[in-house]
Amino acid sequence: MKFQLTEDQLMIKQAAREFAQNELKPGVIERDSHMKYPAEQVQRMGELGLLGMMVNPEYGGGGMDTVSYVLAMEELSKIDNSCSVIMSVNNSLVCWGLEKYGTEEQKRKYLPNLTAGDKIGAFCLSEPEAGSDATSQRTTAEDKGDYYLLNGTKNWITNGGSASVYLVMAQTDVAKGSKGINCLIVEKGMDGFIVGAKEDKLGIRSSDTNTLIFNDVKVPKENRIGDNGFGFTFAMQTLSGGRIGIAAQALGIAAGAYELALDYAKTRKAFGKEISQHQAIQFKLADMATEIEAARLLVYHAAWLKDQNQNYDLASSMAKVFASEVAMRTTVEAVQIHGGYGYVKEYHVERLMRDAKITQIYEGTSEVQRIVISRSILK
Ligand code: CAA
């Protein structure tokens, strides 16, 4: 057993930290307040290779391992979770799925732009009546010979407005249930594809989350990923990796809030001494540090399993449910340690607390992760 990062991994972590501190931190409060999409920051992420980290360099990616990816996710998530969710979806839900299951033609057509950040991807599974219950897809992809006729509505789609490439799950053969679902690559601008309302959210406010509407969109057959009926398996396998990314995001949120609380506790004085000298605060910091370390081990281990080509479905769900709950507890305590200052935007911890909540919801709620975990341990 080795609990050591390689030199390359440490360099990636440091580079991501510097980018987050120097280029994301200035302006993060303003972007969050005004729901301003981080266009310049996303462009820089593309230039730095953060949008296609694990993709083979042949398709424009960084050819890095999953451990490097989670290290970068963790550092960005200490500061700006709108940027880190854009990064996570693009890397692990869109690029990974395309590279793993796409045809050579699909890979050559889409991956170079997606890894460079010239185009952003979105993953479209959720619907008004199919969130956790993802097999209940109401969106239909009717087989018309050369093309599929796509009709329906998708909800809560990260990168919904800013994306150009959408991986859309839709039901082709309802009688076959989850085996009748396909994943289609839909491009912005296709006739009948409408980007609907943008959500006004509690957290990750500068990333865009939209409703998408498909009215008789003709999607060529060559845009289907995998064999006929592979769409649900595609979605589940892709989400298994995606959950490692969100677990890393949750870890970064917790670690970021902890770093801020630790610094604050060492400088803020009350009752004649730094508040870090009061046991009430010391015990909070001790619990935060311990839980973050446990979350970190779960997240890195899930990433490592993926890099070893071992099954990571269980590990990714465990990492996500634990890290997201640690993120919630840690950020609440970080606000508490900051007292009144924690309740105002300038001190950053209130934003991290708002951002933490979504990590318990998207890419499978905590309850869904417990379904995956319990099924795995009971089978
Ligand atoms: N890999 C391969 N196949 C899988 C799989 C996996 N990881 N998980 C399930 N399957 C297969 C099952 O084996 C089953 O096949 P069989 O019928 O041959 O046995 C089929 O898929 C259906 O699976 P279940 O019977 O387990 O389906 P279920 O209805 O009980 O639901 C669930 C399972 C785990 C709850 C699943 O619906 C789920 O994960 N729901 C949550 C969806 C989710 O995470 N949504 C997030 C949206 S994306 C997002 O948030 C991105 C973003 O924008 C940030």
Image (cartoon, rainbow, N blue to C red):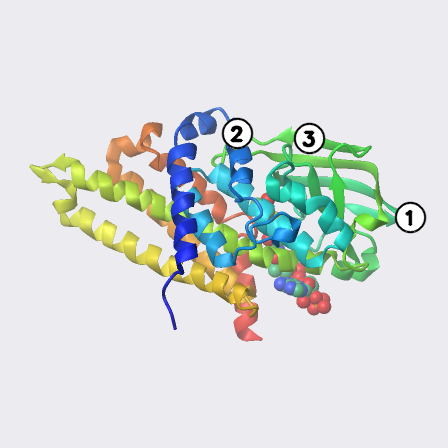
- The residue that disc 3 covers is 196
Residues at marks 3 and 2 touching, judged by CB atoms closer than 8 Å = no
Closest to the camera, between mark 2 and mark 1, is 2
Amino acid beneath label 2:
Glu
Q: Residue at 48% of width from left, 49% of height from top?
A: 360
User: Upstream in the sequence, badge 3 or badge 2?
Assistant: 2
Q: Secondary structure at mark 3?
A: strand
The image position of residue 334, as x and y in percent, is: 30, 42
User: Upstream in the sequence, badge 2 or badge 1?
Assistant: 2
Front position in the image: 349 or 339: 349
**Circle 1: is it few (<14), some (14-19), or many (20+) Cα within 10 Å?**
few
Between the C-alphas of marks 3 and 1, the distance is 28 Å
Residue at the far right in the pictured view? 145
Amino acid beneath label 3:
Gly
User: Residue 40 shows which numbered tag?
Assistant: 2
Q: Residue at 47% of width from left, 55% of height from top?
A: 68
Residues at marks 3 and 1 touching, judged by CB atoms closer than 8 Å = no
Quadrant of the snapshot with the C terminus = bottom right
Q: Secondary structure at mark 2?
A: helix
The answer to which image quadrant residue 16 occupies is top left
